[in-house]
Structure formats: structure tokens, C-alpha cells
Image (cartoon, rainbow, N blue to C red):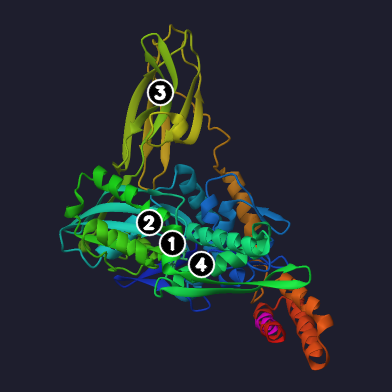
Amino acid sequence: MAHVVGIDLGTTNSLVAHMRGDRPEIIANEAGKRLTPSIVGLDKADKIHVGDTAKNQLIAMPDRTVAEVKRLMGTSQKVRLGAREYTPQEVSAFVLKRLKDDAERYLGGAVAEAVITVPAYFTDAQRQATKDAGELAGFRVDRILNEPTAAALAYGLDHLDKEQFVLVFDLGGGTFDVSVLEMFEGVLDVKASAGNNHLGGGDFDRTVAEWLAKDFEAAHGIDLRRDVKAMVRLKSAAEQAKMELSSMTSTTIMLPFLAVKGAEPLSLETELTRQKLEELIGPMIRSTIEPVESALRDAKLDKSRITDVVLVGGSSRIPLVQALLADYFGKEARRGVHPDEAIALGAAVQAGLKSGAISTERGIMITDVCPFTLGVEVVANTGSQRMPGMFSPIIPRNSTVPVSRTEVYSTTGEQQRVVDIKVYQGESRLVKNNTFLDSYTIDGIPAAPAGHEKVAITFTYDVNGILNVKTKIVSTGKEAALCVDKSAQRMSDGEKGAAKERLDGEWKKPTADSAQPGDATGPLVAAAMAKLPSVNGTNKARLEELVGRLKSASARGDASESARLDGELTNLLFELD
Ligand code: AMP
């Protein structure tokens, strides 16, 4: 039997899991790690690297490395890796290919299918792009699962017998989701979801990095924001400090040789306290309460009815997040599941339900919702006034899925032969405040006075959160042919086939064991060269030798040796200062 796996395709890290007997289990990657960074890099020999090896080259070769591509899914933005250009779904496909290879190696057989998770708040285009990425990686993807629902499945597996209301609070690297569920007799019934597609740990890191850059500019008059490499180092140091401050109250950020002023190398050394961090990221963290309240309102539940608050996502480790929730709910949030692994484990449970690895006798059933309202743009007629740009809902938010609804609309123009249907998601009455999803043109409407002809529009939102639109001209009974707007970010089967072939070709190239850090780490070598005239004898020889060895390790693409020499050179420069 071909295997089915569950995949958490995260902004920061990705994980793959499968069912071992009746328990879900994370599959470690080749390096023995359970988390694979969602980072893709192209080394100097134009070989693709994924995960830690790609992460190693992020600072030295930012123009050949991409992180956080999940933020771009569903957009038409292209990603540059050296001279090559990729779509976001192609970059994600490389991450998924890595996980597929890891799973096949571990399971000793082909993995044909995957259940892939997405934030509940992902739009139709983002879900389609995720599905496409899975297919480009060689998986069949019949099921896209909402991340908080997956986390609830992992949690629910051990709490099947209890009747309770649970709130899953999922704050990751790039997205925030909250879901309210009712659990009873093995049924996990999602009542409501809400969230913010663009909020997570990466935003906290950027805020801290900006603060560090401002401080540095005030002290030295150099704007690091214009230096990509320096900003990558600042962001990485900011993330490290942020994580340390989840268990400590103060930490030191030290970045040697960040810039050069004249011939003088400049370093950064700053104390960051938990208090200062909370001051910087507090407003973003507090903004999570609004979606929590919205989900509770939609679930028609008072916060006192929530039995357990389940924390998921790496950023839920931040003490301020826990304090905020404890204060809001009047009780400690739970660590009933592993914050980094729950989503992948839940996806594996769904995969197990799908493949039959979990017998239906165990009685797990899950229902989900469409977390946003879906509708079309209409012209509202109020007496003599015509108001274009109004939003007419067809599927109200938090409807249980799958759901199919039809609304009938009348023509607004005299002898109108064509209707443009513009599909949006969102909660505003004005389409300009909502998210545009797609547009279709229906023609062949019989000529008639305004308001005489009617068009029935049917929206079907499936369990994967993918929307299908059908229209019918009521007078003729004719289902109009839908013309999909080319601006939608969908790949045709032909495009998918060609892209898959190209990616397969690039993937099959033998991959080097380690990534190259690029030619000699900019400011560090510049600082060493600037130092040379002022040192003599052994020190001069040591400096020259280290610079030479660093350059050749870099040219060879030996990442670990380069990183080691980098450290050695940094120490020597400190010693000589
Ligand atoms: P996820 O998307 O769930 O993998 O979460 C990744 C995010 O969690 C990244 O932004 C990490 O910096 C963040 N993270 C991981 N561990 C911690 C920690 N101990 N404290 C604060 N943030 C963390």
C-alpha cells in the first residue's frame, strides 16, 4: 500500500508525519532533525538545497536563498534565486520534495499522497497554490486541512471521551489562526475560525531588527537597512534574542564587524531585556485578542465556556502571549500538544482517516468551517440611486463545510447581454475593503429591460476550502460557460506538467552535502584587510592565512569549514583590537 503522509508546510519550518499503528509520528529528516527549515537555496554550482543547508547560506548569499515563501503563496510575485526565477509554489514544491524524499527513505516505499495544512485564513488562491505545490512535488493532494483544525485533531486524539469547548490559539512564524471547537463523543466540531494571514514571529524579528538598525544609525550614522546582508544578520540575531527571552529576562546581542566606516570595522553590542522586547512587539501580540473575540462571538460562546485553551505554533512560547491569554480567560493556557509538532501530527491523523490506517470504529469525526464570508460584487439600487461596489454575501462566514448556496441576481442595465461576476471574500459591505478572488464573464443573456433577466450564482465551498462557482441564466436554463479571469493565480494542467518536469530535472541533479556561504563574508574580510597594515609578524601571518583559507573554503562551497573559519577570524580580530 502506498503511504499517505501529513505535512505541515510552515512559514519557518516544515514537518512530515505518518501513522505508526494508531499513533501519529513525526519523520525526522536525513540530518535526524524533526523540523526542516522552509528555506530553499541555490548554491554556486546551481544546485538546489533545502532546509538547514539552505539556511547556512542565507546570510552569505541572500540573493540565492529564499525564506518565508509561504507569505507569497497565491500571489504572482516571482522569487529570484541567482539568475533563476521561480513561482512561490515552485519554491514550496522544493520544500515538499525534500519532505517526500525523507518520508520515502524512512518508510522504505513510495509516498503517493499527502494531506497538507494551511492557515484557516488562507484565501482560495493561497490554497490552490499550496495544492499546486504538492502536485509539483509529485504528491496527490486530495485534502488541504486547516492548521488549527489539524492541531485540534492531534489534541483531540487523547481527549476523545471528554465533552468540552476548546480554543486553539496558533501563532507561528508568519500567520495567526484561532479556532473554537466543540468536542463530544469523538466528534470535533469546528464552530468558528478567525485570524490574520500576516502576523507571526517573523514580524516580531523584523521589528526588533528595525529597532537595532535605528540604534546603530544613531550611534554611527550608518543606515544598515540599505545593506541586505547586514539586515539578514540583524534579523537572525533578533530571532535568537527573542527566543532566549522566552526563558530569560535579558540577553546580549553581539554582531561583530557589521559595517565598515572608513577603515574602522563597526560591531554591534546591545542589551535587550524582555521588558523592551514586550514594548516593541506588545501591540502586535495584543492584536491577537480581536480575532479570539470574533471567533467566540461567531461560535456564540462566552469565554467562560472555554474548557481548554490549546497553544500551538512556535511563537506561542512567548511569555507575553501566555500571560495575555491567562489574563483574558482567567486560566492558564494548556500545553496539551507539542507547539511545533501538533499540526503535522494532526495532518497525519487526517491522512490515517483517509487511507483507512485509522479505523472508523475509533469514532473520530471532524467538521470544519469556511472562516470568511464569500460573495459577489453587485450594484445596489436604492430608489433612484445606483451604488456600485457593494458586496453581496453568498456563503456566510463560519458555515460548516462542505457548503453550497445559490443566490439569484437581476440585470441592472437595459438590454444587458453580459454579466461580469467578481468574487470576493471578506466581511465589509464594500468590495474595496475585501479580498478579490476571481472574476468571470457570462454572455448570451437574452436582451430585455433592466431587471427582467436573472442569473443564479451557486458557490460551493468544499472541505479543502476551495471554491467552485457556477452560474445559470434563469430564463433560458442555460448554464453559462465560465471564463476564468487570467489574473487569477491558477496553473493550468499544461503549465503544471511543464513546471513539474523542469523542477524534477533540477531536483535530480546530485546535491552537494553542504551549501556554499558565498565569497568571503563581506564586512569580516574587509575588516581583516583593513587591519593588515597595522599588524606585524605572526599576527600578520595568522591574519593572512585565515583570510586565504576562508576565501578558498568559500570558493569550494565548504559551508561548515567557512563557518568555522569565520568564527576563528572574528576571534582573532577581537584579540588584535
Ligand atoms: P512555526 O511557524 O510554528 O514553526 O513557528 C516558528 C516561529 O516561532 C518563529 O518565528 C520562531 O522564531 C518562533 N519561536 C520558536 N521558538 C520560540 C521561542 N522559544 N520563543 C519565541 N518564539 C519562538
Q: Nearer the viewer, mark 4 or mark 2?
A: 4
| Residue 352 seen in the current view | no
- Amino acid type, callout 4: Glu
Which numbered disc flags the more N-terminal residue, 2 or 3?
2
Residue nearest the observer in this picture, 69 or 449 = 69
Which numbered disc flags the more N-terminal residue, 1 or 2?
1
Which numbered disc flags the more N-terminal residue, 3 or 4?
4
Q: Which residue is mark 1?
A: 8
Checking the image for residue 472, the label placed there is 3
- The span shown in magenta is 564-570
**Disc 1 and disc 4: Cα gap in Å?**
21 Å
**Whether the residue under disc 1 has CB within 8 Å of ligand 1:** yes
- Discs 2, 3 touching: Cβ within 8 Å: no
Residue nearest the observer in this picture, 192 or 358 = 192
Label 3 residue SS? strand
- Discs 1, 2 touching: Cβ within 8 Å: yes
Q: Which residue is mark 4?
A: 239
Q: Nearer the viewer, mark 1 or mark 3?
A: 1
Q: Which residue is mark 2?
A: 147
How many numbered markers are drawn?
4
**Disc 1 and disc 2: Cα gap in Å?**
8 Å
Q: Nearer the viewer, mark 3 or mark 4?
A: 4
Image point 40% across, 23% down: which residue? 472
Indicate the quadrant of ligand 1 in the picture: bottom left
Q: Would residue 55 be counted in the magenta stretch?
A: no
**Disc 1 and disc 3: Cα gap in Å?**
39 Å
Label 2 residue SS? helix
**Outermost bottom residue:** 538
- Amino acid type, callout 2: Glu
Image point 37% across, 62% down: which residue? 343
Say which quadrant the C terminus sits in. Answer: bottom right
